[in-house]
Image (tube, rainbow, N blue to C red):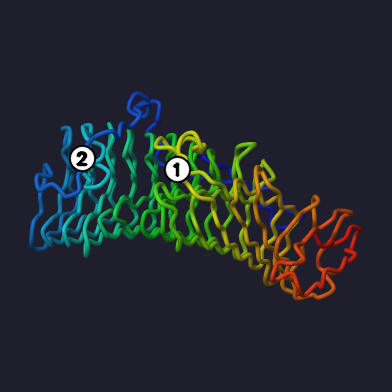
């Protein structure tokens, strides 16, 4: 990552910089360019039941074992270095784990941890501390599978190359809790912290993460993602991928995204409701000129931004669309890719935040935008294509400065005079027949700074 950060404490103090490193500064990704160039092939038969023949060089079954100051390694395809299974409990401390060898079936690797460096399964537990885990050719660093499977990873260093090489990877209702981690993955679709079907819960604290492969996010939510005090960068993916009815919470995080959007949240099959995203004391920066801060497709979701920052080159804060992400996680699917979709319905509550940028909806999608607790928003709302719907609500302590003419359905403002909406000479149209706009009685209201709110 080798990111430079600057701090300026006082006007009279010279500018100071410091560098944040990740494992790619130690092992150059160029050394494993061939692995990282492999495009995953998921067109293999789906496996609905966990296979019983997971191979590993070192197997810990039943009972409790503690190992320290040791090295575990294997060079074989479809073979884990360490397998913890059948209710076993393993403690690792000051250990090196080194994995070579490919995954011949990427679905097995994704759903059941075949070829993972450390695979903890079937109501087992593991506590991993002060450990270096290096994997090559395509393998997860730490994998947890199964209800009552819990893995703790602390003060550890995770490096991987090749596809399906997530840092922390939970599936089948397994849970991983990571603290004080440094992670790097270079392969396609190899996110730093990931859950998979039916769900995996991943909690990360006080860590640094860097993913560089196409479609590799910092977080892939299929289950619960909770991150606190994490500095991350995804060169060719969003900060968060989320598929379906999942939950992602980022607190006091600083995250950078280089592809698609700051988040890319969707339903890959039937549109679902109940997903949540919370960004608290968190900053997301998007690098591409067309990348929105937050992107939603074919989903119904509740979003909370509290003391949050969205920094975009595109000037677009939020996109809601009739769309989803392709299998390769590298572009937004069009109607031609999948016509069996539905519009996105996004309900957003903004608290104590200052945001600049626009809301954009496509193809029947809707965005409900509520400003509370001294929030300020400078921007507009508009249709990218087709008929769309926007609702805007403000409490009396929040302000909206229009950046262009905007049309909303429901306009709600605790300040009955609309004095906290700055017109800048633009017109704010509202639907006088909409239930939450009827309090305006179809009147035209002059706005501060010129312009007006007018009924349609």
- Can you tell which quarter of the image residue 9 is in? bottom right
Numbered mark located on residue 38 in the image: none
Q: Position of residue 326 (x, y in %)?
A: 44, 37
- Can you tell which quarter of the image residue 36 is in? top left
Q: Where is residue 143 in the image (x, y as percent from the top left)?
A: 26, 50
Q: Circle 1 is placed at which residue position?
A: 210
In the picture shown, does residue 247 fall above or below 439?
above
- Can you tell which quarter of the image residue 304 is in? bottom right
The quadrant of the picture occupied by the C terminus is: bottom right
Residue drawn at the location 41% of the way across and 59% of the way down: 246
Residue drawn at the location 66% of the way across and 66% of the way down: 370
Task: Please tell me which residue lies in front, 69 or 339.
Answer: 339
Residue 101 located left or right of residue 233: left
Is there a contact, CB below 8 Å, between mark 2 and mark 1? no
Q: Position of residue 163 (x, y in %)?
A: 33, 35
Badge count: 2
2 or 1: mark nearer the eye: 2
Check disc 1 and report its element: helix, strand or loop: strand
Pointer 2 local density, CA inside 10 Å: few below 14, some 14–19, many at least 20: many
In the picture shown, does residue 288 fall above or below 391?
above
Task: Please tell me which residue lies in front, 52 or 184.
Answer: 52
Q: Position of residue 443 (x, y in %)?
A: 86, 69
Task: Please tell me which residue lies in front, 373 or 234.
Answer: 373
Numbered mark located on residue 115 in the image: 2
């Amino acid at each position: 990552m080798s990111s430079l950060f600057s701090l300026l404490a006082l006007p009279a103090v010279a500018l100071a910089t410091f560098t944040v490193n990740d494992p790619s500064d130690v092992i150059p990704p160029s050394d494993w360019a061939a692995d990282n160039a492999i495009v995953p092939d998921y067109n293999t038969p789906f496996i609905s039941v966990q296979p019983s023949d997971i191979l590993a060089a070192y197997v810990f079954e039943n009972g409790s074992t503690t190992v320290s100051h040791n090295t575990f390694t294997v060079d074989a395809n479809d073979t884990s270095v360490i397998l913890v299974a059948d209710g076993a409990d393993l403690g690792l401390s000051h250990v090196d784990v080194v994995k070579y060898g490919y995954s011949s079936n990427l679905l097995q690797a994704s759903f059941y941890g075949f070829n993972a460096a450390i695979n903890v399964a079937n109501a087992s537990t593991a506590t991993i501390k002060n450990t270096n885990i290096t994997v090559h050719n395509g393998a997860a660093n730490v994998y947890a599978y199964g209800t009552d499977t819990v893995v703790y990873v602390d003060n550890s260093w995770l490096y991987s190359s090749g596809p399906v090489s997530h840092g922390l990877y939970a599936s089948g209702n397994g849970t991983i809790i990571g603290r004080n981690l440094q992670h790097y993955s270079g392969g396609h679709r190899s996110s730093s912290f990931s859950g998979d079907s039916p769900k995996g819960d991943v909690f990360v604290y006080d860590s640094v993460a860097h993913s560089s492969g196409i479609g590799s996010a910092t977080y892939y939510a299929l289950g619960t993602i909770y991150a606190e005090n994490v500095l991350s960068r995804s060169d060719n993916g969003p900060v968060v991928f989320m598929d379906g009815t999942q939950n992602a919470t980022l607190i006091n995080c600083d995250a950078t995204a280089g592809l698609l959007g700051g988040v890319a949240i969707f339903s890959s099959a039937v549109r679902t409701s109940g997903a949540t995203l919370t960004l608290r004391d968190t900053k997301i920066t998007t690098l591409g000129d067309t990348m929105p801060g937050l992107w939603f497709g074919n989903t119904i979701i509740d979003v909370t931004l509290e003391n949050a920052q969205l920094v975009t080159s595109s000037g677009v804060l939020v996109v809601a669309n009739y769309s989803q992400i392709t299998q390769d996680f590298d572009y937004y699917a069009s109607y031609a890719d999948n016509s069996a979709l539905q519009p996105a319905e996004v309900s957003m509550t903004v608290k104590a935040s200052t945001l600049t940028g626009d809301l954009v909806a496509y193809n029947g999608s809707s965005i409900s935008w509520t400003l509370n607790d001294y929030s300020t928003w400078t921007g507009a709302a508009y249709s990218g294509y087709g008929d769309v719907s926007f609702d805007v609500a403000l409490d009396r302590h929040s302000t909206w400065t229009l950046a262009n003419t905007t049309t909303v359905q429901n306009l709600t403002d605790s300040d009955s005079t609309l004095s906290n909406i700055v017109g800048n000479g633009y017109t704010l149209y509202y639907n006088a027949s909409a239930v939450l706009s009827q309090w305006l009685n179809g009147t035209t209201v002059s706005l501060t700074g010129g312009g007006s709110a007018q009924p349609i």
